[in-house]
Image (cartoon, helix red, strand yellow):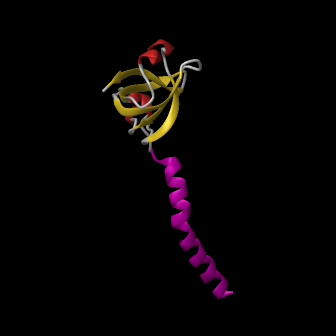
Amino acid sequence: MNHIKKLAVALAIAATPVAFAAGSVDGMDMKIPAASQQSPQPVASEIKKIDAQAGKVTLKHGPIENLGKPAMTMAFPVKDRAFLKDFKEGDSVSVTFDKVGNQPTVLDMQRK
């Protein structure tokens, strides 16, 4: 019986850090800053594809800090489809992104 008590105590001690770590994340104030708290900054990008009819542009872009997105290639809707006519695939551009209707969107795009 003495061995069972020792084993129970050893298991309890061994499990405590795991239980504490799992509970501590919920109990601590570990707020991740909301992406929209940062102001949108221009991001260096390259136009890979333009779909004017759908109002989307596929961009190979650097990190988008205000949206918390790493560098990647992704299609984005544009706020104003009209300005897409001024660009072509392969253009190097500076793009400003933000969320519109909770969706990452191109607000502005300027040729570099």
Q: Quadrant of the C terminus?
A: top left
**Prevailing secondary structure class for the magenta stretch in the rendered image:** helix
Instruction: Write the start and end of the magenta stretch as one range.
Output: 1-29
Point out residue 45 in the picture as x, y percentages from the top left corner. 38, 33
Taking depth in this image into account, of 79 and 102 the one nearest to the observer is 79
Q: Magenta segment: does it hold 57? A: no
The residue at the far top in this view is 82
Residue at position x 60%, y 75% in the image: 11
Taking depth in this image into account, of 110 and 22 the one nearest to the observer is 110
Taking depth in this image into account, of 106 and 4 the one nearest to the observer is 106
Residue at position x 44%, y 24% in the image: 88
Q: Quadrant of the N terminus?
A: bottom right
The quarter holding residue 9 reads bottom right
Point out residue 71 in the picture as x, y percentages from the top left corner. 42, 42
Residue at position x 33%, y 24% in the image: 111
| Residue 39 higher or lower than 70, as above or below | above
| Residue 71 higher or lower than 67, as above or below | below
The quarter holding residue 109 reads top left
Point out residue 102 in the picture as x, y percentages from the top left corner. 54, 25
Residue at position x 60%, y 83% in the image: 6
Q: Magenta segment: does it hold 4? A: yes
